[in-house]
Image: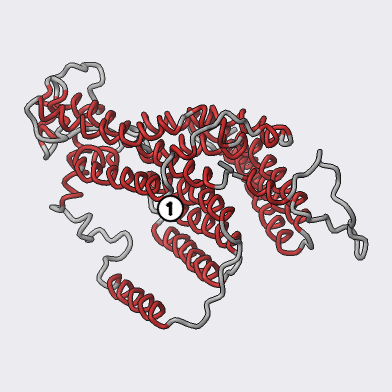
Amino acid sequence: MNVAALEIVAFAMLLLLVATALIIVTRKTLLSVVILTGIYSFLGAGWMLLLDAPDVAFTEAAVGAGISTVLFLATMALTRHVSAAPRRLDWLPVVAVVLTGAALLYGTSDMPRFGDPAAPAQAEGSLSHFFLESERAAFEAHHGDHHDDEHHGEDEHHAASPAGKDAVGLPNAVTTILASYRGYDTFGETTVVFAAGIGVILLLSGLSGTQFTGRVESNALKRMPVLRIVTKLVIPYILLFGLYVQFHGDFGPGGGFQAGVIVAAALILYGLVFGLGPTMRVVSPLWVERLVAGGVLLYAGVGIASMLRGGNFLDHAVLASSASDGEHYGILLVELGVGVTVTAVMLAIFYSFAGRGRPA
Amino acid sequence: MSAALDIVGAVLLGLGSVALLVGALGLLRFPDLFSRMHAAGVTDSLGGGSILIGLLFIGASPATLIKIGMVLFFLFVTSPTSGHALARAALYAGLRPKLTDGDDVEGPAPDLEAPPAPTTARREVL
C-alpha cells in the first residue's frame, strides 16, 4: 500500500476512534460504555496494525477488547448499571481536560509528518537507526548467502554489523530491542505489571478469600451445551497459539506480553463458561500468587546469572560460549518471565474481581 | 490458470464486500435484536467467509493459505457460538422476538430448562 492510501485509511480509523470516544462520553448506560470501550480498543489495534506495529496491536486487541471488557463486566455485576447523573457541572475537570488536550495538540505540531524519512527516529545516526541497521546486518550475516557453513567464524559474522559483537541477529528486531538492547526498561515494565497485580490483590483483600471451596457450579454447566462444547474445542488451540506467540516471538510478531495475555484469555474464557471454581482447580490462587512473583524472579534471575558470569546485569551475551547464542537464550528466558508474570497477574485480577460477588 | 484463480478470488471478494454492506444496512434497518443479529450474522459468515475464501484463491504462499484456513475455521466456530450466546442471553433477559406488526410474542418465556432468577443469572455470567 502506498503512503497516500495508507494515510487515508489511518485517518478514517482515527476519525472512528474519536467518534467512538465521543459516544462513550455521552452514554449513561454502563453496559454500552463497556462494549464501546471494547470497540475503541479494537479500532486502536487495527490502526496499530496499519502502522506496521503488529506486536502492539496484538496486545491491544487481547487486553483492550478482550480481558479488560470481561473485567469491566465483572465489576459492573457488583455495582449499578447506570452512571449517576452529576448534580451540577463541575468546571475544574472540564478546564483540566481542555487544557491537557490543548497542550497535547500543541505538542503534536512539533512532531514530524507520518512516514517522514528525516524524522529523528529514522534519521541516520539516531539510536533506533543504529539498532535496526546493526540488527539487519547481523541477521543477514547469519542467514544470508552462506547457509551451508553454520560454524563460520563468529568474528567474521559480526564484522559486518556496526554494533560489532553485541548485535543479536534475530528476525524480529522488536523482540531484540525489547528484550536485549533495552532489557532493563522491559524489566521495569514487568515490575510495573507485577506491582499492579499485587496492588489489586491487596486492595481486593487477597486471593485467599477467593479460595476454591470445593463447590462446583454445576447449574451453569448444564444449561449451556453449545458454549461448553465450543469452549472445550477452542481452548486447546488458544493455548497452543499462546505458546506459539511466546516462543516464536523471536522470529515473528509476539513475545511474553502478548502470549501472557492470550494464555490468560483462554483461562478466563474457561472461567466464564465453567465457573470460577473449576478454573481455580486448574490454576489455584496459591499458584497464581507464586507465578506473579515467579516471572519477575526469572527475569531478574537471568540478569543475575549474567552478572555471575562476569557481565553486566541483563547482558545476555555472556550466558553462553558464543555471544549470539547467549543473547538468544537470554531473550527466550526473559520473554518467558514476562509471559508468566502477565498471565498470572491477569488471572489474579480476574480471580479477585469475579470472586467478590460469590457468597462466602 | 493463475489469472482464472485471481478472477474467482476477485469475484468472491466482491461478493463478500456486498454481503458486508447488506449486513450493515440490515443492522441499521431491522426492527429488533433478533433480526439485527441475523444481519450481523450475514456480515460474519457470508461477508467474512467469502472474503477469506477469496483470499485463499489469491493467496501467495502455502503458509499464508494454512493461516487463512485456520482463521476460517475459527470464524465458523466462534461466530455462530457468540450469536447463540447473545440470543440466549437476550431471551433470558426477557426480550421477545418481534414478529409481524402488532403480533409480538407475549406471555411467559419459552421453556429454557428453568431459566434462573435475574440475580443468579447475572452472577453466572462471571
Residue at image mark 1: A50
Q: Nearer the viewer, residue A1 or B23?
A: B23
Q: Which residue is rendered at x = 52% and y = 38% of the image?
A: A268
Q: Looking at this view, name the residue that lies furthest to the left.
A: A310
List x then y, in percent, for residue B65.
Answer: 54, 32
> In the picture, which quadrant includes the C terminus of chain A?
top right
- Between A298 and B113, the residue placed more toward the observer is B113
For the view shown, which residue lies furthest in the front direction?
Answer: A360
Where residue A217 sits, quadrant-wise, is top right
How far from the left and from the top, in percent, is residue A208?
44, 37
Q: Is residue A47 left or right of residue B77?
A: left
Identify whether B111 is placed above or below A143.
below
Looking at the rendering, which quadrant does residue A176 occupy?
top left
Q: Is residue A45 left or right of residue A138?
A: right
Residue A50 in percent (x, y) is at 43, 53
- What amino acid type should be assigned to the residue bearing mark 1? Leu
User: Label 1 lies in what chain?
Assistant: A
The coloring applied to the image is: secondary structure
User: At x 31% / y 35%, what residue is drawn?
Assistant: A293
Q: Secondary structure at mark 1?
A: helix
- Packing grade of label 1 (10 A; few <14, some 14-19, many >=20) is some
